[in-house]
Amino acid sequence: MVTERSARESPEQRAAEQVVLVVDDDEDLADTCRYWLDGERFAVETAYGGEEALHRLDDTVDVVLLDRRMPNVTGDDVLDEIRERGLDCRVAMMTAVEPDTDIVDMPFDAYLVKPVSESEVKETVEELLVRSGFESEVREYFALESTEAALDSRDVEELREPEALSDLRGRLEAVRAEHEAAIRNREAQLDRLNRTNELLRDIDRAIIDARSRDEIERTVCDAVASAHEAAFVLRRTAAGTLRCTAAAGYGLDPSGVDLDFVDEAFDIDGTVEDGFAFEDVSEAHRAAVFGDDAADLDAVSALCVAIDYRETVYGALVVYDETDGFDEESAGLFSDLGATVGNGINATQSKQLLNGDSVVELEFQVDGGAGVLAGLSATLDCRLSLDGVTRAGDELTCFVSVAGASGCDAVAAAIDAADVSQARVVADGDEESVVELRTDAEAMLSTAIDHGASVERLTLSEGSGTLALHVAADADHGALVEAVTTAAAGVSVVAKREVERSVQSADSFRRTLDSKLTDRQKTVLETSLVSGYFEWPRGSTAEEVADSLGISPPTLHEHLRTAERKLIETYFDELNPASADD
């Protein structure tokens, strides 16, 4: 079986994002915060000290998590420099220094006392990013409120200047009195943001435990309806009609939801216009969706977001809420939720594909040099077979066996092709060579992978050949076939069959692995595991693990690499027994 692994897109490959800078001389803590925040809607960078932070800070940074107690250049120094430069970024002090009245006049936006939790860090960053868009007077109010909250955690008698807290509260009251309406509006916005973020975290946890697409859709609808008025999930059938597959709220029944009123959210090709807000949820619309319960609702807003993963659209989520409208932040968060659900569906189908006793095999005929690899086999008049493929952003890295031409000739021909960004010889043999090619134009393969398929085999000779894909039994086979056959000219489906898989038992897997590992390698692996060497941040360094075993670090690494290779080989041999016999 050809294996595929998705790689996280690099910051350069992602769209322009808001930037969060974590500043702390404790590198492990800084890296931990970055790990917590990585994968959110913003880019995260680290600076291991005040001097490094001052070199990085510019007007592209939106939020700074700033430690106060650092050598040479302290967090207070960095904060003063930020304001002196006039940088318009929000700053959260994140420190073990217990707050006192000396912070009253410090120009920060939030104050976190260590130790901090993942949820505390995430919620603070998300709120500060939203507060960046507030009016300056309202931002001042929330900053003062954060300072008061930090001091409120102390007994007044313990403060150096208790009257400073009283003066701060007076300033707070004055600012609120002057900007009452704007502050109330922004408080409501932050409340919606916090509720939506809490909802997203609940759904993230639930999706991890879900075992099927139907279960994911039901879970999402139940969670969204608990925080809003109602929600339902739509799928577009092969015939082009909409079908409601899950619903919750106001006693909604999937079979009873009238979908005529949500069809406008879909483009002519069936793709949902992501973040589509219904301008007018009329009484007729409400009655069609909620039936007799519509009379209990006042102003109702509706939002439709795509459920997608990469280029695959699985459907749409429609959310109803008894408000005057979804603001931009809420719409953006729900769009992220749609992507999370799509990722969960893809992952669930991948697990079913990996663990199921049987899968569906789709076989395609490839003609006319369809794609980079087929074109290469035609150019070289040789036979190519795909051994493995990995993905990084839009680019695929393909490992290809070449028979009938040398590896050097294959690399030279690939480099001449405009769609190959990099090529090299991995192994050059007399009868067969292995080459590595990087391309963003192998649409047939990338489309299959986007739809959750496993590339079982691809063999090509003189520009033509066969492609076999394995997909989960409950996947949308029709949508996959249509996507693959339209991705490249000359590709047509020729067969669909159910394939029984030879599943190795856990005991058999362990026995096979035990026979390959030496006692010393097992000891090194187990010691590294229990000592936290494989955690991030690491509980023990390589030097500490080696010392506990009475060996040198290079010897430890040698044993680890050998044991890891044997473990990985055994795993992939179990996935693809045929390759082990070749």
Image (tube, grey):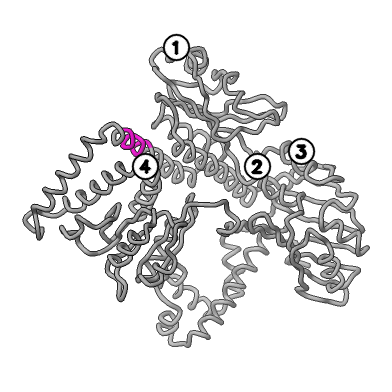
Per the image, label 3 sits on a secondary structure element best described as helix
- Mark 3 closeness class: few <14, some 14–19, many ≥20 residues within 10 Å: few
Would you identify the image quadrant in which residue 161 lies?
A: bottom left
User: Who comes first in sequence, dot 4 or dot 3?
Assistant: 4
Q: Give the residue number, with chain letter if any, for mark 2.
A: 312
Q: Which mark is residue 482?
A: 3
Per the image, label 2 sits on a secondary structure element best described as strand
- Mark 2 closeness class: few <14, some 14–19, many ≥20 residues within 10 Å: many
Q: Give the residue number, with chain letter if any, for mark 4.
A: 134
User: Who comes first in sequence, dot 1 or dot 4?
Assistant: 4
- The quarter in which the N terminus is drawn is bottom right
**Disc 1 versus disc 4: distance between alpha carbons?**
40 Å
Q: Position of residue 539 (x, y in %)?
A: 39, 71
**Disc 3 versus disc 2: distance between alpha carbons?**
12 Å
- Mark 1 closeness class: few <14, some 14–19, many ≥20 residues within 10 Å: few
> Which callout, 1 or 4, points to the residue nearer the camera?
4
User: Who comes first in sequence, dot 1 or dot 2?
Assistant: 1
**Disc 2 versus disc 4: distance between alpha carbons?**
36 Å
Q: Nearer the viewer, residue 269 or 12?
A: 12
**What's under tag 4, amino acid-wise?**
Phe
